[in-house]
Image: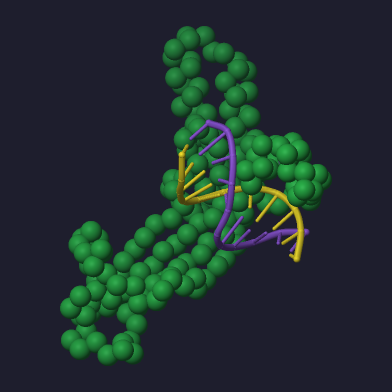
Chain colours: A green, B yellow, C purple
Amino acid sequence: MDCGAVELSDSSSSGYWSVNRGPRSPAPPSSAAETNGRSATPPDEDLDMDLDQVLFEEPAPRKRRNSLKVAYQCLWPSCGKVLTSLMGIKRHIRMVHLSAQKLTLLTSLGTGVPGAISQCGRAVAAASERPLQVSVSVWYCRLRAPQGTCSLLTAVCLLVRRIRSEAKKCRKVYGIEHRELWCTPCRWKKACQRFLD
DNA sequence: ATTGCCGGGTG
DNA sequence: CACCCGGCAAT
Ligand SMILES: [Zn+2]
């Protein structure tokens, strides 16, 4: 049985933009109807056209949806693939990374090195099996360009974070008044390295 | 209200 | 690189 992993992102990049250009409104009233992204417009390739001329109708983009998902991120150097199932990254690491690594090693060293590289790969694989929390938020911003072109800018943002552990970290342990006692990542508001999960 | 920390800055 | 901080989700 193969329950396929749903792919969230094909790289470690955490977002993408899309601009859906709506129909030209001949005389744009102030209460212009929203353009909706499902209109049959051909793939938009001239994104660089005059984005600097576009006016943002709202002072700030608005977040409309937010959903939380458990996901797993491959921690193989410069990979960062995010998949939504544990079996997915296990298979990804085995197929994409471990097999290729074994091949190059075996060809360069001739004799099979039994445990060394699979030990290294095991460490990466184990670290990649830690569940992460991905919050998916969709942002919308109404745009208006010269000549009454109306569009809706859509941005999907993926925020990948660790699941919160119950462990007390430096800030809680030493207190905000003894910041000099915190570990370096805690001082920088990064993941604590003194009190691990 | 407080805590933990990711992303995105600055020198 | 070292360092700081806004913002966000969890507590
Ligand atoms: Zn710490």
Residue A64 rendering spot, x and y as whole percentages: 50, 73
Q: Name the quadrant containing residue A23.
A: bottom left
Residue lying at the far right of the rendered structure: A173
Q: Quadrant of residue A35?
A: bottom left
Q: Residue at x 44, y 12 (%)?
A: A108
Viewport quadrant of the C terminus of chain A:
top right
Q: Position of residue A7 (x, y in %)?
A: 48, 52
Residue A74 at x, y percent in the picture: 54, 40
Q: Residue at x 39, y 72 (%)?
A: A141
In this picture, residue A9 sits left or right of residue A171: left
Q: Is residue A32 visible?
A: yes
Taking A149 as reference, is A128 left or right? right
Q: State whether residue A191 is above or below residue C11.
A: above
| Foreground of the two, A145 or A125 | A145
Q: How many marks?
A: 0
Q: Is residue A37 visible?
A: no
Q: A114 above or below A38?
A: above
Q: Residue at x 64, y 47 (%)?
A: A189
Q: Is residue B1 left or right of residue A20?
A: right
Residue at point 76%, 38% (across, down)? A181
> For this rendering, which residue is in front, A29 or A106?
A29
Q: Position of residue C3 (x, y in %)?
A: 59, 39
Up-down relation of residue A29 to residue A20 (above or below): below
